[in-house]
Amino acid sequence: MLKSLKLKGVGPVPNLEANFGERLNVLTGDNGLGKSFLLDVIFWTQTGSWPNDRVALPYSKTKVEDPEIEYGRFGAQQPYFNEFHFDYASQSWPEKEPLNHDLVFYVAVDGGIHFWDELRGFRPKSKHSAWIDHPADPYQFNPENLSNGLQVDGQRISNGIVQDWVTWFLQRSINNGNAAFSRLESVVRTLSHPNEPVTCSEPKRIFIDDSRDFPILSTQYGDVPYPHWAAGLRRIIHFAYLLVWGWHEHVQNAKLQNKAPYKNIVLLIDEIEAHLHPKWQRTILPAILAVAKELDPEIKVQFFVTTHSPLVLVSLEPHFSNEKDKLFWFDLDKDVIHFQEYPWSIHGDATGWLTSEIFGLKQARSQEAETAIDAAKAFMRGDFSKLPSGMKTKEEIHKELLRLLPGMDPFWPRWIVEVKP
């Protein structure tokens, strides 16, 4: 698990330093400032590979002679730091062995999921040779191979959710209880919205020209077959499936290698709120904090989550621990991107977060309503030089406020005093 990270001359922040929380790390900030990039670097520190070969490159605005990545880990018996320098000739970072016993999941915003397990690095040279150890490559899942299975170098790595759902369900029925399907049911139950629960149901055939049975989710409004799951639901169930699949495969591989399963998971999620309704945004992160216990009660997870959602941050207010969790902020100031740990505080509701420094809105309104209220305030102050076009008079401002503000808006009492004859 990652304890610290230093980047010099790499990525959009010229010199980035962070000491991470041992449980939850939330990354916020405007679009394009480096949140996803930082997740890519964290993935590399843990696995030795770049997701989809997106290699981190030197910062182009301020040239640094010796770009470097340095990181430290939790749990090392002695202080553990690793330092790597960019090679301009090969345009790459030196190969590294991860040297950790963590399972790593990276849930990307495009629907892909990258999974790394050190034990999957043991593979035979040929049919007749002994097993050899080499650094494991992460498995790069996309929506297609999440559905129908992943093959690497001609070897089938995963059967995909369509086949595994059927197999796990039948094994549960035949054996009076299958761990994989039971775990999938528990994980899906934990992640689904408490007021709109979904449950894993018996697979069924649904197409004339496709003889396969497909996963079925039971909802309050009926059964929904796999091809028809909505985007947000599909992303969450794909994550649930791969989490269960990855743990199930890890336990099986540990058994084959006569090893104990690892108990640490590093989980990276980019834009956790993607495709989710606000009601679900308000519950998803606390649910994910709890979900690993559905795999094994002894598992410890370190989370790295990016978000633009004030509701995600609101949902953390009852759960955030100053001892174990950190909030980080990317901010653009005069064409320079800054990265800093941001002190956690409770804002009470989404409006409080929207108008905080993190999101930087003056008011949680439309731009037009904000402009009209600013004009009204300027008029009441007598600062007529700041009145915008179309709102130069009391009547014009009043007309615009009537158009844009609801009848119970808290600004009305201030303005009514001004306009009252």
Image: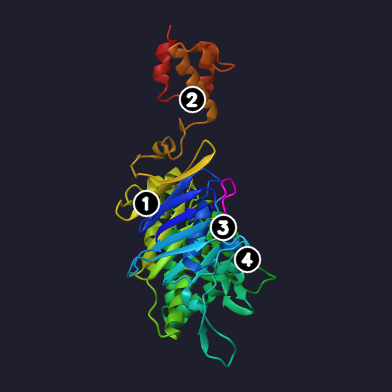
Q: Position of residue 345 (x, y in %)?
A: 33, 42
The disc at residue 56 is: 3
**Real-space Cα distance between discs 3 and 1?**
24 Å
- Give amino acid for label 3: Ala
Q: Most extreme residue toward the right, as rendered?
A: 209
For marks 4 and 2 on the same chain, the one whose residue lies earlier in the sequence: 4
- Give amino acid for label 1: Lys
Q: Which residue is mark 1?
A: 326
- SS label for mark 3: loop
Q: Quadrant of the N terminus?
A: bottom left
Which quadrant of the figure has residue 166?
Answer: bottom right
The disc at residue 405 is: 2
For marks 2 and 1 on the same chain, the one whose residue lies earlier in the sequence: 1
- SS label for mark 4: helix
In this rendering, position of residue 182 left or right of residue 53: left
**Real-space Cα distance between discs 2 and 1?**
37 Å
Residue 132 within the magenta-colored segment of the rendering: no
Q: Which residue is mark 4?
A: 144
For marks 3 and 4 on the same chain, the one whose residue lies earlier in the sequence: 3
**Real-space Cα distance between discs 4 and 1?**
35 Å
Residue 261 visible at all: yes
- Give amino acid for label 2: Leu
Q: Within 10 angstroms of label 1, few (less than 14), some, or many (20 or more) residues?
A: many
Q: Nearer the viewer, mark 3 or mark 2?
A: 3
In this rendering, position of residue 262 left or right of residue 31: left
